[in-house]
């Protein structure tokens, strides 16, 4: 039976992965065991999806992004190039905690994460929120808010189409 999604020949998809119809996985990606990727997603070059990660439908992940275990992306999320997710606030190479201790991160429907933004684990990014390029997310981001800076601060409100609105 012909698969209903595309995986470039240079990419690896482990056993036990679910990939939705019309999803495209481009060069040098790795999709690890237990990952679930929805329909009509695009994964750019050099994307890593770790074990048991859940990605909704219509998600676009640009080049050089790693989505680590404990992170969930709902439908319509955009991840800009080289944005970073974490899953452990105090990692140690010599004393690994194991996946049961990872802090969960949720990116809600329609949110946008700009290039080179860093999302510290244990936070929720609200629906249709917009994270500016280079921002460090250190706490929850409310729905429809624009955040920027290091550490992040709310700088405005936005609608579903990306238009700024009055606070």
Image (cartoon, rainbow, N blue to C red):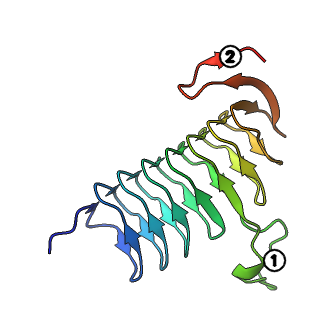
**Label 2 neighbour load within 10 Å: few <14, some 14-19, many 20+:** few
Q: Who's the residue at 46% across and 68% down the image?
A: 36
Cα separation, mark 2 vs mark 1, equals 43 Å
What residue would you read off at disc 2? 165
Q: Tell me the element at label 1.
A: loop
Would you call the spot at circle 1 few (<14 residues within 10 Å), some (14-19), or many (20 or more)?
few
Exactly how many numbered labels are in the figure?
2
Question: Relative to residue 95, is residue 64 depicted above or below?
Answer: above
* Quadrant in which residue 104 is drawn: bottom right
Quadrant into which the C terminus falls:
top right
Extreme residue in the left direction: 1
- Left or right: 126 with respect to 154? left
Q: Position of residue 108 (x, y in %)?
A: 63, 48
Please state the horizontal and vertical placement of residue 72, each as a whole percent of the image. Answer: 60, 60
Q: Residue at x 64, y 51 (%)?
A: 107
Question: Looking at the picture, does residue 88 appear above or below residue 33?
Answer: above
The residue where tag 1 is placed is 92
Residue 116: % across, % down = 63, 43
**Which comes before the other along the chain, label 2 or label 1?**
1
- Location of the N terminus by quadrant is bottom left
> How far across and down, in percent of the image, does residue 11 sit?
34, 67
Q: Quadrant of residue 27?
A: bottom left
Q: With respect to residue 122, does 159 lie above or below?
A: above
Q: Quadrant of residue 111?
A: top right
Q: Is residue 86 visible?
A: no
Disc 2 element: strand
Mark 2 touches mark 1? (CB < 8 Å): no
Q: Is residue 159 visible?
A: yes
Write the residue at 80% across / 47% down: 140
């Amino acid at each position: 039976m012909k698969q209903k999604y595309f995986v470039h020949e240079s990419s690896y998809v482990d056993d036990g992965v679910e990939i939705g119809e019309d999803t495209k996985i481009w060069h040098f990606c790795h999709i690890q065991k237990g990952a679930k990727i929805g329909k009509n997603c695009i994964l750019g070059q050099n994307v890593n999806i770790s074990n048991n990660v859940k990605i909704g439908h219509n998600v676009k992940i640009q080049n050089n992004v790693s989505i680590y275990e404990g992170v969930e992306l709902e439908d319509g999320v955009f991840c800009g190039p080289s944005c970073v997710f974490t899953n452990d606030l105090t990692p140690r190479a010599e004393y690994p905690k194991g996946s049961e201790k990872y802090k969960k991160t949720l990116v809600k429907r329609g949110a946008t994460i700009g290039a080179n933004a860093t999302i510290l684990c244990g936070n929720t990014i609200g629906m249709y929120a917009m994270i500016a390029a280079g921002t460090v997310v250190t706490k929850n981001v409310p729905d429809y808010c624009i955040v920027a800076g290091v550490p992040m601060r709310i700088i405005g409100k936005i609608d579903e189409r990306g238009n700024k609105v009055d606070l």
